[in-house]
Amino acid sequence: MAIQFIDLKAQYQALKSRIDARIHKVLDHGQYIMGPEVAELECRLAAYTGAKHCITVASGTEALLISLMALDVRPGDEIITTPFTFVATAEVIALLGATPVFVDIEADTCNIDAGKIEAAITPRTRAIMPVSLYGQPADMDEINVIAAHHGLAVIEDAAQSFGAEYKGRKSCNLSTIGCTSFFPSKPLGCYGDGGAIFTSDDALAKAMREIRVHGQEKRYVHTRIGVGGRMDTLQCGVVLAKLERFDWEVEQRLKIGARYNELLAGKLPVVSQRRDRTSVFAQYTVFVENREQVQDKLKAAGVPTAVHYPIPLNRQAAYSALSRVSGSVNTSDTMASRVMSLPMSADLSQQEQGQIVMLVIEALSK
Ligand SMILES: *Cc1c(COP(=O)(O)O)cnc(C)c1O
């Protein structure tokens, strides 16, 4: 069988009876919007992360947008983030008329360089939005200290890191707000779009719940501007079914990541892992110089690869004019030309992984 970049079919086969049962239960009770599975999932996820509140929403992007709206981010405000991320991180800032301020990344983890954040802060700064890239949290303690010193909120874009830990605490519960995504290929995915917001702040949670449903405090009473941002009941059912073996999947991801590290050691540089945290490896990413060539060779050998991300956001046409770069983002530019992600999922077999590594090493040498 051909190697999949992310093997969702094997996961479905393993969980088929649970997933099918969950879906049929929703079809039977018919409460497609805000049905009982929504509150059930929110309860389970809050308990999993340790956050007081979980608010499910229509996508990871919506989670970030609703978070900024709940913080009352306005035109002219500045939000500090990384240019080396999926576009949604900056998109939601720009949608509110605020300015994404890009701070460079660390060369080895590709996460935001916490040491460079302070220099980016101005009187207009409202929040810091670090991304837990590839599934590994950034230096959240350092970032929280800076934020507290300047009275800023911290929103963790944890779209890739649900299940990861930082100093024994779960990603999504590391700062003022944590946002994740249940896009099918994320570490915890549904079968469509979905996402969740986590916070232990009661007032923010109340605001987020209202914003999620058109800013209504009660039916047809709109006290603030909101969005149509609910996660549907069917998708909540799918995530509930997937939670049944999620601990096992996280364990597998850690093992597979560690095995990649071992097998590739001395052969090529890979994204570093800090000792005080884990990565759930939404992507397993390496650095190569002649990326296109290596990717072509691997493709021909039946190994799919991907690039996360080829163009830093400050260089994207839609964002170059309405964002600001703090200092230089040279590291982000360099890494954008080198990163390459290898197949990764909990169901990747040891044999497949060995084959991938062999073909990667072969592709490098020719
Ligand atoms: C996937 C992703 C998002 C957006 O999530 P969606 O559910 O696709 O809207 C945001 N930020 C990062 C870093 C992501 O990887």
Image (cartoon, grey):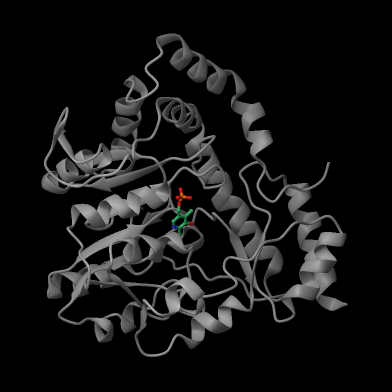
Question: Residue drawn at (54%, 56%), measured in percent from left and top?
Answer: 281
Q: Nearer the viewer, residue 251 or 181?
A: 181
Is residue 111 among what the camera can see?
A: yes
Please state the horizontal and vertical placement of residue 17, each as a whole percent of the image. 59, 18
Question: Residue drawn at (34%, 36%), measured in percent from left and top?
Answer: 230
- Horizontal side of 249 relative to 137 (left or right) equals right
Q: Residue furthest bottom?
A: 327
Please state the horizontal and vertical placement of residue 102, each as a whole percent of the image. 37, 78
Is residue 52 among what the camera can see?
A: no
Please state the horizontal and vertical placement of residue 295, each as a whole percent of the image. 77, 68
The N terminus sits in image quarter: top right
Please state the horizontal and vertical placement of residue 173, each as a whole percent of the image. 28, 51
How many marks the image carries: the answer is: 0
Question: Residue drawn at (51%, 14%), measured in percent from left and top?
Answer: 24
- Horizontal side of 184 relative to 295 (left or right) equals left
Q: Nearer the viewer, residue 284 or 64?
A: 64
Question: Compared with residue 300, is residue 333 higher up or lower down, i.e. above or below?
Answer: below
Q: Residue furthest top?
A: 28
Question: Compared with residue 84, is residue 164 higher up or lower down, i.e. above or below?
Answer: above
Question: Residue drawn at (30%, 66%), measured in percent from left and top?
Answer: 140
Q: Nearer the viewer, residue 19 or 324?
A: 324
Question: Compared with residue 27, is residue 287 higher up or lower down, i.e. above or below?
Answer: below
Q: Quadrant of residue 240?
A: top left
The C terminus sits in image quarter: bottom right
Q: Quadrant of residue 72?
A: bottom left
